[in-house]
Amino acid sequence: MDDFVCRNLTEWGFGDLIVKFKEKKIYTESLLALGDKEIKDLIPRGRLRKFKKNLKELKLLHSGSTASNPGKRRLAQPGPSQPKRQCNSTVETIAEDSKTMSEVMKIMSSVCDTLELQDETTLNGFLKNKIDDLKTDKRKLIGVFGRSGAGKSSLINAVLGEKSLLPTGRGKACTTVMTKVEANMYDEFEANIEFITKEEWEDELWSYYRHKDDQRNDDVSEKLQALYAEEPANHEKAMEKRHFREIPEFLTSETKVITCHSAAAIPEALKTYTRRSKPGVKQYWPLVKCVTLKLPNNDFLKHVTLVDLPGSGDRNKSRDEMWRGLVESCSTVWIVSDMERAADDKEAWNILNSTTSLMGNGGECERILFIATKSDRAIDNAEQMGKDEACAVILQANEDAKEDILKAFAQEDKLKSNFSEFQVFTVSSDEFFTEKHLSKNDTEIPKLQQFLQNLNDHHSKTCNYVTGAYGILSLMLGAGRAGMSGKRAEVYTALEGKLRDQLDTVRKAIEEACTAFKTCLSEGVTTSEKSCERIVDDFLNKNRDNSSFHRSLKSIVKNGGACKPPEKNPELNLNGKLCEHMFESIDEQFKKTFPNNAKHGPFDDVIADLSLDTKSLTEKYQDVQLQLTFLTTEEEKLKAKVISIIREEKKTIYACLAKAIMESMKECYEAAARCKGTGSLQKMKNGIIMHVCSSKTHMFRDTKDVMMGKLNELKERILKTLEEELRKSMELSLRTDDDSIPDVIKEYERVKLYHHNLSRSVLATFEFK
């Protein structure tokens, strides 16, 4: 099966059927020629309609492209995440968009400066805030996971076109340090180093010295060897200021900034902050929480941040919280494994499985990219082959590896149910730079670069900015045109009625979703009440070695029900175990209501469909066209804002179950933490079991009420945001005349032309809606 079929199935949400299509030998031509009978054999009944719709659109697109070039078949090949526009990622388009954005930003900056010189009025302040809001830009986050030695650093270097940016092949990277890579607005390379707090380090030291004889403190012992020439006698000595003279930022909780003139200089500048070295060399990585590298003039990172993440959280609280926050915010995840072990790489699949809930229902991950690195090492005797022969052998090995990885994914039911967009790439970072056996395209690095370009979506961001600017200037121009109060009043009345109707529609849709959640949660409560005692008993006693579990349980109760054991061991989370049936009861409904891998869910659909019907009013009331133009642009911006609020709040809603259980168990944990002396392990166990038995009748029902409360809060926030902001825009555009607003006719005409040209380019380059 070729990439064309694989990519389209993934984009349509049928990635789980790739193996089946491969077995049936469905290639490009046979996909386009599929008939109803063949489709029924391939596609489950409940998904037939969606598949047929996508296939029909693909056939129309294909027939259009071949008709425009008779004699030469041309298929759209925009890369792994095919956008609806074909040419938005070309160098020429990016350059043109950048020029347009720069020009319009200059215009709006000048307008804002002029407003600053005017008297402060309600409309004046409103306009300045609106201009400032145009600059808001949320970056897309890509999380990069993979074990040490898998080739993550080489991959990132190649994709960004900076061969020496991240250190490769020498020394051992510190897995606790998270590394972000993003664009810099200044013309220099910069590294921002964020430390844990000195209080956190002191707590870690205090615990180490108190339990110094415990062998499981080896990780802290390694940190002490790295940071101190000789191990201090106690934690007070270890905290003396003289140890931190070279990093005063650590003591003052500030970010340390290191600037370099080239990418090649960064690894040396950061080696003591991110790499483990031989004993005797002072290293600061034990105190580092995150390093952010900022690169100048890199189009791949304008609106995207790459973050190299450990495979699991950290024992340090602030590092763990940052790790969880980053994982929740990843729109895409790259799982990196070397070619030789990719399909059987247990660590890679464990990372995916252990973070599924955090990335899926608890986050915003839309797609998983599995990247097998070092593909050029697929042959041992490459030197004895010609370039063409070596290339053919490597490419065949790549296809075999992709097939194996897709089969492995097909067996992961939990992953399949959460992520339908699963793509596989086989890359060679070395060959990308040397082209010894493979062309650059054969290394598949360009496909990942195209993926980044598509994710940046420079064109859409330019369109959004210019459209917003056009609306603001329309309002400013219309504000000084008095004498139409009667027509404005008519329009306002019509809009007010439409707003009430639309808000009622939104309210009804959200309440229907809430009712569905209530039913699911009630089932979860019943199951949880019946099984909670068994769950707690299994957690505390099943396959537990009391001698080693004692300290783990002590850590669990001291940390509110969860603890991260030493590296590579799974998290021990009693709260998560207690509410696992609650999660199971809502997971499917949650995915339907708050999907990550689809354009819309029930909430988003009703928001996207919301309209004050300003277009029809513009045809009827030509004299109020400028104000209605502003309201049209504001309506679209507001809908995008509300959908963003939903995406963010759904993380809090999903996480509230475990937090509610933790709150219910708080008293019990605190009592267990006070247990000391002989028999303290059994006392802790007994106390936890007794608490669960006595509180189960209300604990899970209270947890259900917490989630329902959060859903209701989201409903009220959505309705309030829509009503308040739309009404305010209506008031200021249709019930306000302000003679102090400067004349912006020249600026308006210039931005109107930019807006017109962008609108035409969108219509010309969109393949289909």
Image: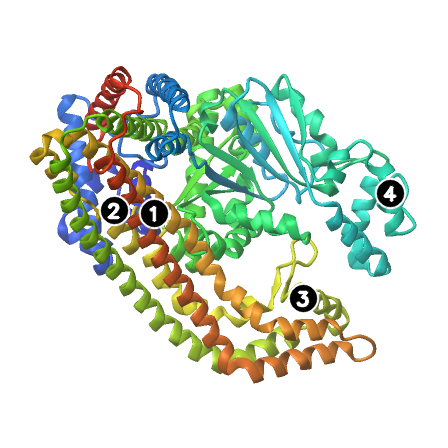
- What amino acid type is highlighted by mark number 3? Ile
- What amino acid type is highlighted by mark number 2? Ala
Does residue 712 appear to the left or right of 214 in the view shown? left
How far apart in space, not on screen, are marks 1 and 3 (Cα)? 37 Å
Does residue 191 appear to the left or right of 395 in the view shown? right
How far apart in space, not on screen, are marks 4 and 2 (Cα)? 58 Å
For the residue pair 558 and 253, the one nearer the viewer reads as: 253
For the residue pair 531 and 690, the one nearer the viewer reads as: 690
Mark nearer the N terminus (1 vs 2): 2
User: Callout 3: few (<14), some (14-19), or many (20+) C-alpha neighbours within 10 Å?
Assistant: many
The residue that mark 3 highlights is 556
Question: Disc 1 vs disc 3: which is toward the camera?
Answer: 1
Local secondary structure at mark 4: loop
The residue that mark 1 highlights is 643
Mark nearer the N terminus (4 vs 2): 4
Circles 1 and 2, Cβ within 8 Å, touching? The answer is: yes
Check the picture and name the quadrant holding the C terminus.
top left
Residue drawn at 85 percent across, 60 percent down: 210
How far apart in space, not on screen, are marks 2 and 3 (Cα)? 44 Å
Residue drawn at 87 percent across, 37 percent down: 242
The residue that mark 2 highlights is 608
The residue that mark 4 highlights is 240
Question: Disc 2 vs disc 3: which is toward the camera?
Answer: 2
Mark nearer the N terminus (4 vs 1): 4
